[in-house]
Amino acid sequence: MKNGKSYTFILQEDQESRLIFLGAAEDEFGMNWIEGSKPWGTIICPDGIKTAVKREILPNGHLQERFCFENVSEFPVFFKKTDVGIYATFHDDYRQADECMIRRCHTHIFCGGEASYVMAFRMGGQAPHLGLMVTAGSISSYSTERDEGALSNDRGDFILHPVIEPLKPGGSAEIVWELFWFEDKGDFERQLIGGGKIPVLKTQQCTYFPGENIVFDVFYGAHVESADISVSFNERCVAFQSDWDGAVTRIHCGQKADNEGEIRVCIRVGVKELNAVFYVSPDLRNLVRSRCRFIAEKQQYHGEISMLDGAYLIYDNEEKTRYYSHLDDHNGGRERIGMGALLALWLQKEEDPCLRESLTQYVTYVYRELYDEETGTVYNDISHNLDWHRKYNYPWTAVLQIEMYHLTKETRYLEHAFRTMKRYYLEGGDRFYAIGLPVSELAALLRENHMDMQCEDLKTSFFRHADYILERGTSYPLHEVNFEQSIVAPGTSCLLQAYQISGEERYLDEAKRQLKLLDQFNGQQPDYHQFENSIRHWDGYWFGKYRMFGDTYPHYWSVLTGVDFIQYEQATGDHSFREMARASLRGCLNLFSADGSASCAMVFPQTVNGKKGNFYDPWANDQDWALYYALKYEDVILEGGL
């Protein structure tokens, strides 16, 4: 392995040959990588199928597991997609951050057919990490089973679904995978490629715009003649180049993105097949224009309920109607302020009298129902309701006010944004990891407008906040979820903004450390739902119509990682994260359709607790922050595309 390190598997099995402990002898933390409600290797299959598991340590140190399926009935057995499953219970849940750092892992699953793999990172970043690659057979999808009583904090047990063709009486099939330890992402890729067991696709993007070139390379650690290679886009063969360097066959493909929508890519390399999925989004400005018009025409309320007049509400794409509930994540405030921020930003790019009037009515609603401009208090819902005095609401309201200043040039909005942030800090915000904190931008605007006292007041509170985050380090405090990407991302952002304002290296040093932890929430599976999209697995329940837990690939707050990458570049001039930032911002565009409709989350697993998954929730709810940041950093998202 990298740097000459090697690790020894420690295994414990139950009486049915299922693993109950898997660890590395050299791991100082003694982490069990496979904790779950069922033992690792538990098999689901139909009646009439006999199963067996064989497990051995290979000469290269990998742990091989062979799962055998035999039809012992008198009749043929056909399989639906989820009839067969193997529990792969990677230890992926959230407790206190300090415990997560050493004894939990981020599990990045790629169901790419015969080229499937899992990359599991210890959350704190310290090697060894655990990988899995399928070496015989094919994985089509995965499901999860989770304890819903744990709410947002337990990702659940993963169930990998093999593809098994119909078995005649006496017929058999098997799936084989290898588990291995790795040091970092580069080492993981080297081990996947070097053994010559599966092809590996590498790309910088999985989401493109019309006219751009879809570009990727496939690497395979064995010699394969060009005649034994094929590449197809939506079942249409396309051109490619291939070469052999004596160790690896490299296949290069570049095709222009002509049509919007999903592109299913199949790469055949010798006897192995890799399935990837790319996406061509509508042009960004066309997409934003359509979305803003949809919001104004279909999501703004005008009716007999005066408290909601002007509000941007949830829209149900199935029932074709607006929806409101005082239930926190379904109400007329909170995350839905992103719709107003998006319109305010868009109108700076393109004037539209109808949208301008809609936004004016919305801001009137916000100031009437959700905001006290004298105190800076942001309310949780209409009628100045404070059933929950939620700190997250403050920076989002400040962002709206900042964009209204940019749009109107009325300095009262800057004064209000300052009061909003002052109230945030009076409410204890200096010990809270708020999403979307706009301090560096607001401070610069206050200074430019000769509001020096307000600027200094804001900075005093902010540096107290940054010092608290600096002192906590990676011992993140519990928030609405025990530990998550949108705790690490705001912490990193705060440190980067503190460095940008002060130039003090101590903030940058800690930001770099936390940026590495943030990066580990993201995988690079060649599927546009997952590529550079952060692991999140609860948002569909809180914000969706169907109240489904389960991995949300994508969820719009995934863009916070890309935003932090951009803030790092702005603060340092270092372009190292530019491509990853672009991929992160593009990765959520599939939540928006060309007609302006949208979805709050894509529930990705095939099933969750036995219920059908793999769908976009029909509610347009809180997802517009993704489009806001895509437009805000339009120069990044579009750079170098053609």
Image (cartoon, helix red, strand yellow):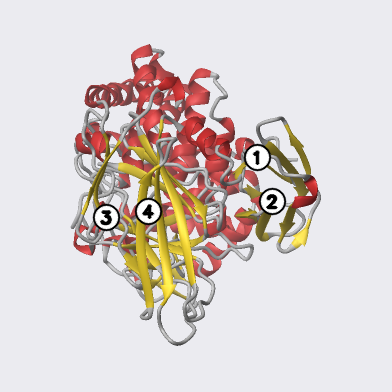
Residue at (73, 57) in percent of width and height: 232
Labels 3 & 4 near each other (Cβ < 8 A): no
Label 1 to label 2, Cα distance in Å? 9 Å
Label 4 to label 2, Cα distance in Å? 49 Å
Pointer 3 or 2: first along the chain: 3
Residue at (66, 61) in percent of width and height: 261
Identify residue for label 3: 152
Residue depth check, mark 3 versus mark 2: number of the one nearer the observer: 2
Residue at (42, 64) in percent of width and height: 68
Q: What is the number of the mark on residue 440?
A: none
Labels 1 & 2 near each other (Cβ < 8 A): yes
* Quadrant assignment for the N terminus: top left
Identify residue for label 1: 222
Q: Is residue 45 toward the left or the right of residue 352 in the image?
A: left
Residue at (37, 36) in percent of width and height: 129
Pointer 1 or 2: first along the chain: 1
Q: Amino acid at mark 2?
A: Gly
Q: Is 239 placed above or below 562 here?
A: below
Q: What is the number of the mark on residue 270?
A: 2
Label 4 to label 1, Cα distance in Å? 50 Å
Name the foreground residue: 221 vs 53.
53
Label 1 to label 3, Cα distance in Å? 43 Å
Identify residue for label 4: 335
Residue depth check, mark 4 versus mark 1: number of the one nearer the observer: 1
